């Protein structure tokens, strides 16, 4: 029986990533009001988190694991470009894998750290609540803003640029669908102003990251389909 090629494996892994990410994100929006809830006071966030119960923790677990699925997808994508299209994208792959790992580390705080803060908050006195507030804010600023959103997104931009360049060089369907991904890159970069505004309040904020995500995920689906259906540009190894 013939083994599936890397084009099929890469496309399937990318689709699995998109499915898990969107399913988990939809659950977080429904159960937790994500991500608008993050702009609320700490007490409100932790009370809402506690009310979500085990189902909410499972949703965060799925969201975190989707970042690890992306690591696998990035590796399969590199193999597909090397085997089927003669394009080497290992530098970009290293950035993509690092992005997935870093974002997973940041997201797992909602699985293993935030639940302990949320369970302690209702029974805490004034001093204890102040300490929980400081812990939550510091954790969010470092694991969320610095690692997951800033560093994770910068590495994701580098992965995207490397893969987009390979798509353009390859030609065919991969080339033309890459135009969608190219449109997302400047939005990613400008969207970083929202993160820096947390420490530089006078900085003008351009809330473009949601639009970048939508374009990027649309391109990722097109990339997955293209990797599956586009015929190799070079003989398979």
Image (cartoon, rainbow, N blue to C red):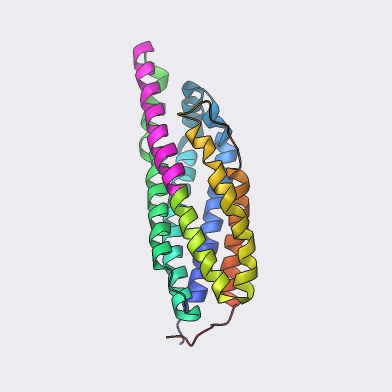
Q: Front-most of 97 and 188?
A: 188
Number of on-image labels? 0
Q: Is residue 204 magenta?
A: no
In the image, residue 210 sits, relative to residue 42, either above or below, namely below
Query: Which part of the image, by quadrant, shows the C terminus?
Result: bottom left
The residue located at (41%, 39%) in the rendering is 146
Residue 99 locus on image (x, y percent) = 42, 53
Q: Residue at x 49, y 80 (%)?
A: 84
Image coords of residue 39 (percent x, y):
54, 28
Membership of 129 in magenta stretch:
yes
Give the side of residue 211 with respect to residue 165, left or right: right
**Residue 111 in view of the camera:** yes
Q: Which residues are magenta?
A: 126-152
Q: Tell me residue 114's x, y (percent).
A: 40, 33
Tell me what residue is drawn at x 50 percent, y 79 percent: 85
Q: Nearer the viewer, residue 43 or 31?
A: 43
Q: Residue at left 55%, top 63%? A: 15
- Dominant secondary structure of the residues highlighted in magenta in the image: helix
The answer to which image quadrant residue 88 occupies is bottom left
Residue 4 visible? The answer is: no
């Amino acid at each position: 029986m013939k083994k599936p090629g890397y084009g099929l494996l890469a496309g399937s892994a990318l689709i699995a990533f998109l499915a898990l990410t969107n399913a988990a994100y939809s659950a977080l929006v429904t159960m937790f009001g994500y991500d608008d809830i993050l702009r609320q006071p700490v007490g409100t966030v932790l009370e809402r988190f506690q009310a979500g119960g085990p189902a909410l923790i499972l949703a965060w677990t799925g969201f975190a694991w989707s970042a690890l699925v992306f690591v696998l997808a990035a590796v399969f994508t590199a193999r597909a470009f090397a085997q089927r299209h003669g394009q080497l994208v290992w530098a970009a792959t290293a950035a993509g894998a690092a992005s997935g790992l870093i974002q997973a580390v940041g997201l797992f705080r909602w699985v293993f750290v935030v639940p302990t803060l949320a369970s302690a908050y209702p029974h805490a006195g004034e001093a204890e609540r102040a300490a929980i507030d400081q812990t939550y804010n510091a954790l969010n600023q470092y694991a969320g803003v610095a690692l997951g959103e800033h560093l994770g997104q910068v590495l994701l931009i580098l992965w995207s640029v490397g893969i987009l360049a390979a798509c353009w060089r390859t030609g065919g369907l991969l080339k033309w669908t890459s135009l969608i991904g190219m449109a997302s890159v400047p939005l990613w970069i400008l969207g970083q102003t929202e993160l820096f505004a947390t420490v530089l309040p006078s900085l003008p904020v351009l809330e473009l990251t949601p639009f970048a995500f939508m374009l990027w995920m649309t391109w990722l689906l097109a990339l997955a389909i293209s990797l599956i259906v586009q015929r190799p540009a070079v003989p398979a190894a």
